[in-house]
Amino acid sequence: MNTSGAASPPEWTTAELMAVELARLLRNDDVAVMGTASALPQVACGLARATHAPDLWFVAGGTCGVNPHLAPTVASCCDEDLLRSDTVLPLGDVVLLEGRGDVFTVFFAGGLQIDSHGNCNLVAVGDRERPALRGPGTVGLPFLSRVGRVLIYSMSHTRRTFVERVDFLGGPGFLDGPESWATAGLTGGGPAAVVTPLCTMDFDPTSLRMRLRSVHPGVEVEQVVAATGFELVMPDVVVQTQGPRSEELAVVRRLDPSGVLKGR
C-alpha cells in the first residue's frame, strides 16, 4: 500500500516530476525570471504560488508578463497568451531589473552545454568560427551572476549536454571553481540546483562542483554517472527524489490542462 501520499510513477511524466521538483526549490519571498522555452518553470512557479509560496512573483521573459494567468500552460514565454497576467513590463525594463541585482532572487537557466561548475552555454558548440551547433546567443544568461540563485533545468541529460567545461561561457556559474569565483567580484549567489530527467543535483560547498543530490524514481546512480561528461561529487547516501504528491499533481494538471508537460 502506498502510504507516502506520492502518486505512483505511471501517473505522472518526467516533465511533471521536474516541474514539481523545481517548485519545491522556490520560496515565498522569491521574485523569479525565466527565458523563452520555459513551460517547466512556468508550471513550477504556478504550483509554488498555489501551495507553499503564495507571495512569489515571476516574470515570463519573452512577453514580460508578471504572474501570468496560467491554464493552459504554453510552451514558450513568447506566446501572447502570457499577456494574460497581473501586469506586463516593457522588455527594456526587465533587462534593467535583471542587471540591477537587487530585484530577482531566482533565474531559471539552461543551455546547449552545462558544465561541472554550473556555467551555461547557449551560444555555440565547437569552434566559435565554425561551430558544430549554433544556439540563440547569450540572451539573458550574463545576468546569472546578478541574481540570488540560479535554478538550472534541462530536458537533456547526456554527455554532450553535461560537459567538464563549456565551449562558450554565456552564463556564469561558479566559473572555474572557488578561487576564480572568489576573485571575480560577482554579486549573485551562483547556481543552487540542477534538475534533469534523471536526477536533481546541487553544488559541493567546498569545490563548487556539481553534486548528485537525488535520483528520480526508476533511475539508478550508474545511469546518471554514465550520462554525465564529468565526475560528479557523490554524497555518502544518494536518496530517491520524492515523486509528485497527489495534491501537487492535481495543481500541475489544473495549470496544464492541454498536457504540454505530459507530452515530454
Image (cartoon, grey):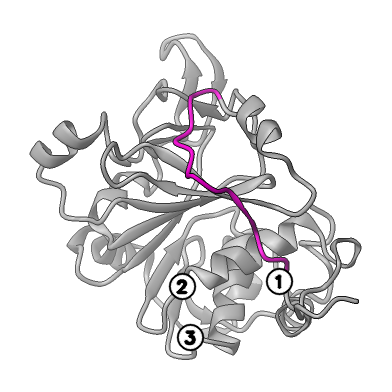
Residue found at x 83% / y 61%: 262
Could you say which disc has been placed on residue 53 in the image?
Answer: 3
Could you say which disc has been placed on residue 26 in the image?
Answer: 2
Give the left or right position of residue 193, taking residue 74 as reference.
Answer: left
Closer-to-camera residue (136/127): 127
For the residues labelled 2 and 1, the Cα–Cα distance comes to 19 Å
- In percent of width and height, residue 60 lies at 50, 67
Q: Is residue 259 above or below residue 221?
A: below
Look at mark 1 in the image and give the residue it sits on.
73
Please say whether residue 79 is visible from this viewpoint.
Answer: no
Q: Residues within 10 Å of mark 3 (few under 14, many from 20)?
A: some
Looking at the rendered structure, the kind of residue marked 1 is: Thr
Magenta segment: 229-243
Q: How many callouts does the rendering have?
A: 3
Could you say which disc has been placed on residue 136 in the image?
Answer: none
Give the left or right position of residue 117, taking residue 124 as reference.
Answer: left
Q: Secondary structure under badge 1?
A: loop
Closer-to-camera residue (215/165): 215
Residue contact at pointers 3 and 2, CB within 8 angstroms: yes
Q: Earlier in the sequence, mark 1 or mark 3?
A: 3
Looking at the rendered structure, the kind of residue marked 2 is: Leu
- Image quadrant containing the N terminus: bottom right
- In percent of width and height, residue 128 lies at 41, 14
